[in-house]
Amino acid sequence: RVAGAEARVAGAEARVAGAEASSSSDEEAEAAEGRDDAVPLGRLWVSAPGTVSPLHFDATDSYLCQVRGRKRMLLWPAALLDQLRPYPPEHVLARRLQFDVTGGAPHADAHREVGAPMEVVLQPGDVLYFPAQWAHYTEALPAHVDGRLGASFSLGFRTDGRYLL
């Protein structure tokens, strides 16, 4: 398990971590506006099976490219964001959501109100696009690579559209 190691790769910041955590804040992106080299365009996520990224939303459009292993994502459209109970913008957990994705008995009413999420299982070679403010929960699934249980490798990209062809 490698945690917190950072490296510059082709002008983009790569993060290697045992847990998938959002590492760059929207405030950093806003502060760096106009400086092409200041905002990471891509991230490398290396995740052991069972690693989760808690329910949250990104302020920009996102692409997730699955390179190795498998990853399960639950997604809710931006129109449901308020029902998923976001923390206030000034809170330390801003962009995280308080909705319990497990749907256990104490939360069954909330799940009926919000409805079922879209569920996607990414395999190697798959690319998922999701718009800004779409809520998502991510879980690295067990996957056998070369006969062994292996880690999930994903590349994530965020964009405001400036970098699209």
Image: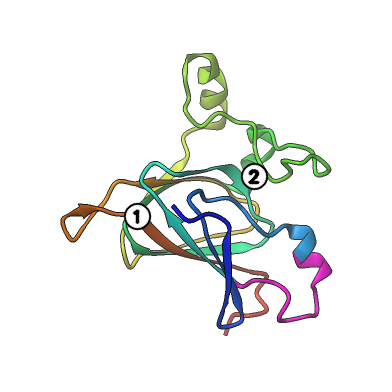
Point out the stretch of residues depicted in magenta: 29-41
Judged left or right of residue 65, residue 91 is: right
Tell me, yes or no, whether the highlighted magenta stretch contains residue 33: yes
Tag 2: amino acid: Ala
In the image, residue 67 above or below residue 72 = below
Viewer-closest of 52 and 95: 52
- Residue at 70%, 72% (x, y): give it: 39
Q: Secondary structure at mark 1?
A: loop
Tell me, yes or no, whether the highlighted magenta stretch contains residue 122: no
Q: Quadrant of residue 94?
A: top right
Tag 1: amino acid: Ala
Residues at marks 1 and 2 touching, judged by CB atoms closer than 8 Å: no
Mark linked to residue 120: none
Please, which residue is most extreme toward the left here? 147
Q: Secondary structure at mark 2?
A: helix
Question: What secondary structure do most residues of the magenta stretch adopt?
Answer: loop
Cα gap from disc 1 to disc 2, whole angstroms = 33 Å
Residue to which mark 2 is pinned? 79
Viewer-closest of 65 and 82: 65
- Residue at 83%, 43% (x, y): give it: 90
Q: Quadrant of residue 131?
A: bottom right
Residue to which mark 1 is pinned? 151
| Colour mapping used in the image | rainbow
Question: Residue 89 at what x, y percent from top left?
Answer: 80, 44
Viewer-closest of 114 and 137: 137
Q: Sequence-wise, which precedes: disc 1 or disc 2?
A: 2
Viewer-closest of 44 and 80: 44
Question: Residue 59 at what x, y percent from top left?
Answer: 69, 57
- Residue at 68%, 33% (x, y): give it: 85
